[in-house]
Image: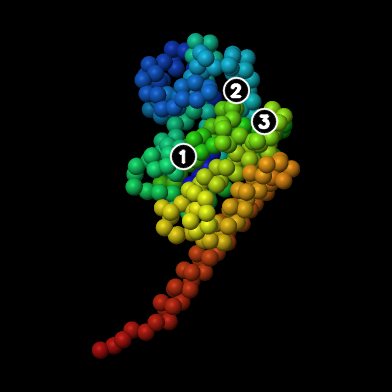
Amino acid sequence: MLFVVSLWIIKRKRKTHSSKEITQITHNFQHEIGKGGFGIVYRGSLKDGTMVAVKVLSSSSSQGSKEFEAEVLLLARVHHKNLVNLLGYCDDMQHLSLVYEYMDNGTLRDHLSGKILNGDILNWNQRVNIALQAAQGLDYLHSGCTPPIVHRDIKSNNILLNRESFNNDYATHISTRLAGTPGYLDPEYYKNYGLNEKSDVYSFGIVLLEIMTVQSGDIINIIDSRLQGYFDINMAWKIIEVAMSCTSTTSEERMTMSEVVMELKQCLNINELQIEFEDTKSSIQYSSGTIASD
């Protein structure tokens, strides 16, 4: 089973909704599924039955209509396979809202913490694929947009998983609320009160450590014990090294997201070659065996 990772971002094709339509889409704001600096997120559905997530700006938010409009215009610039699809928005001051496609399988944090009680845990390859694809989405914001877009709030709670019906894969998405969360926030922020691409790299490094480990100690012990030893130790060391580079206290010493993507791809490629080798080895051993006759 593979995972496809995406970021909460607005695509170009989007529909303007009225305040009345937002009320109808959210079924009168009945199903709250999240809350953050932007406001409250509700589950809803469009007239054609499409499930959506609607972020409604809170009255206590510091963001006003001009900031909201600027954000919509900013996010409308980007398009990438790992960026979540914005279906529409409402610019009515009564209900300033963003209407996204609905991610139906919780957050990465939910899965890592065991909150998703479906009996499954993320295996090693799934975790590395999630990390790689999240890195690709983030790299696009940094290197594929002019000027570069700094996310500013990369964390496991903002990485959403969506099971794809046609092949049971997952899609993973990262929210674009520009905020910053203690524990994930670049320590250099407290010196210059500014965030840049390397700030995102730092936050991603924290997420990478979170994906792979559960406690401090020897490499064998810090990898999530629920994997029951089913991971490649050399690959684990490499990923930990990437994470430690990302979380260097000085931004100059951190990798770029392009370098992170390259390193994670290399890890996956080596792992796939090892799996193919083991499969070929098993096949040769089986075909060279003899069958005893009576």
Res. 258 in view:
no
Point out residue 83 in the picture as x, y percentages from the top left corner: 56, 36
Q: Dot 2, how many residues are within 10 Å of its Cα: few (below 14), some (14-19), or many (20+)?
A: some
Give the image quarter of residue 178.
top right
Amino acid tagged 3: Tyr
Identified at 48% across, 69% down, the residue is 278
> Residue tagged by mark 2?
72
> Residue tagged by mark 1?
109
Indicate whether 106 appears above or below 36: below
Between discs 2 and 3, the one toward the N terminus:
2
Point out residue 265 in the picture as x, y percentages from the top left corner: 60, 53
What mark, if any, has residue 34 been given in the picture? none
Identified at 67% across, 31% down, the residue is 189
Q: Residue furthest right?
A: 252
Mark 2 against mark 3, which lies toward the viewer? 3
> Residue tagged by mark 3?
190
Amino acid tagged 2: Val
How far apart in space, not on screen, are marks 3 and 1 (Cα)? Answer: 26 Å
Q: Dot 3, how many residues are within 10 Å of its Cα: few (below 14), some (14-19), or many (20+)?
A: few
